[in-house]
Image: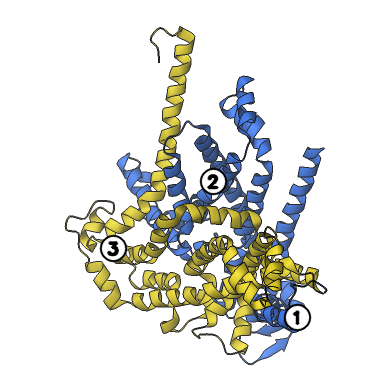
Amino acid sequence: MGASAPGARKRGSLRRTIGRVIVNFLMIVFSVSCLYPVVWLFYASLNNKRDFTVNPVALPKAPNLDNYFAIFSQSDMGVWMLNTLRNTAVSLPLILLFGFVIGYLLSRFHFRGHTALYGYFLLGIVIPIHALMIPLYVQFKKCHILNRWFTLPVAYVAFGMPIVIFLVESYVHSIPVEMEEAATLDGSGFSRTLFSIILPICRPVLVTAGIIQFFTCWNEFSFALILVSKDTLVTLPVGMTLFKGQYSTDYPGMMAAMFLSILPAIILYLAFSKQIIKGMVTGAVKG
Amino acid sequence: MQNPIAPKKHVLLLYLLPGFLLYTFVVVVPIFVAAYCGFFNWSGGPKMRFIGFRNYAELFKDGVFWLSFRNNILLTVISAVGQIGIAFLFASLLSSGLVRAKAFHRTVIFLPCVFSAVVVGFIWSMIYDYNYGLINQFLKLIGKGSAVKPWLSDPKWSLVLVTIPLVWQYIGYYMVILLSAYSSIDRSVLEMAELDGATGWKKAVYITLPLLKNTLFVCLTLCIAGSMRVFDNIYVMTGGGPGNSSSVMALYAYNTSFVRYRMGYGSAMSILILALSLLIIGGSRGLLARFNRKEGT
């Protein structure tokens, strides 16, 4: 910024500097609003009830883990976490497996009914599944598969499949058919080619799909609310709402529970934020 | 099929069938179940009484349902303007080079997208809280104690107040989509525009906006589909209240079926929700596509 710059240019650069400051300030304010809640959940969860009521945003005077011990001893937090973990761990591989196999078949082979099947799975992306909450409950009840350990995975796998099918389908188009042809000539059977040659090539798209589906399963609320009501099967997001009703005055305790419930997602996100953002974008735009 | 790499017919079938059956059972069959149950007066027990189209007749006169539908639409409009508008602004600022620490902002602003609705709802309930809420504390601080109120209990504002967290949570989602579209814009186009004297908002409106049109349409369809199925955020924050002022279709269907045990009526409602959602999602897509074609010629 030369001191000898003509007046007009000086004014211009001053205006630009002010603009720059305002714009940066605006972005920082919003970014802080996204980050602060997590930080607040964390430090308020180390506070005690009395100090929290005096000033909810103040830092705790004597930070301690009492709230964490309390939620594990007085609520089913541990059970909820295990349930959510199990649901996710069961659903995720199956979503990816079905999505991969069907996506591959739809992409490579024009068998009879191919187009119809393609449209049939597309339906799963188009229809708003939340309109199906009530009939799905009725149906699961009639089949006596409400309140089982596999109830939610059954639903999650079916809901997650279509998007993975289409992600894999478009990815396989970019793989040259010569891959499989060479493998077949070398005597590799269909299944072996599928799992030991195509599967590794599809790793990037499956990672993308897996990331999206992890967060979907981990945070899913509506179907967990209606399909499962047994205490031993309640999931983390639904458990949180029970917690809210039960200890409506124990804010720091509730914040400890909230913080714990988002901690796995935060750790995963901070570790893989680039891939996660990329995955979500691809998933969104393709879907 | 003379394709040498193709599996035998029974192998193909074996691979397709499990996924196909599961998907059919969970996603497709419920539509027929809802259509069937919608013809009955049924509280979920063994007694089902066939009543023809009476549920649907009642539904068309059900003020709460249409209020919920209206709320869905309002919520969609607020979300579309708020989420995509702010996301576009942020993406433009971040791509303009005016803002420092671009990667930091991107990472942090996307963070709320990985939170569950329950946590987001709780955080915002705390902000709106009567005793401890940030808004009321702020109002007291600046000496406007008379404006202090239990925010979420005001039926006039409840819908807007439950929509704000949704906007806040998903700005990052649309922002990263728009940012990736920005990065694919040819640099030289922007440089040419700058040489021609287009700066700041002029560049944004006349150059980048048209170039990002397709991506913005993708965002818009995602936002509409997302807003039509809103449930958990509102369930957690207000439960649809006070009264039914912040109710949405999915929430009303839930309350009808699981709180008032009107399964038949709830099923009929599911069918109507499905139809209305498809109509709006499909309609908006068609409209956008037509708009797109017109612009193109």
Between tags 3 and 2, which lies in front?
2
Chain assignment, label 2:
B
Q: Quadrant of residue A280?
A: bottom right
Q: Secondary structure at mark 3?
A: helix
Asked if the residue at tag 2 contacts the one at tag 3, i.e. Cβ–Cβ closer than 8 Å, the answer is no
Asked if the residue at tag 2 contacts the one at tag 1, i.e. Cβ–Cβ closer than 8 Å, the answer is no
Spot the residue most to the bottom: B46
Q: Nearer the viewer, residue B31 or A126?
A: A126
Specify few, some or many for label 2: CA neighbours under 10 Å numbering under 14, 14-19, or 20 or more.
Answer: many
Q: Amino acid at mark 1?
A: Lys
Where residue B144 sits: x, y (%)?
35, 41
| Residue B175, label in figure | 2
Chain assignment, label 1:
B
Left or right for A105, reference B197: right
Q: Nearer the viewer, residue B43 or B283?
A: B283
Q: Are marks 3 and 1 on the same chain?
A: no
Chain seen in blue = B
Left or right for A256, reference B198: left
Colour assigned to chain A in the rendering is yellow
Query: Which residue is denoted by mark 1 in the rendering?
Result: B8
Q: Are marks 3 and 2 on the same chain?
A: no
Asked if the residue at tag 1 contacts the one at tag 3, i.e. Cβ–Cβ closer than 8 Å, the answer is no
The answer to which of marks 1 and 2 sits earlier in the sequence is: 1
* Residue sitting at x 58%, y 76%: A155
Between tags 3 and 1, which lies in front?
1
Chain assignment, label 3:
A
Where residue B112 sits: x, y (%)?
45, 54
Specify few, some or many for label 3: CA neighbours under 10 Å numbering under 14, 14-19, or 20 or more.
Answer: many
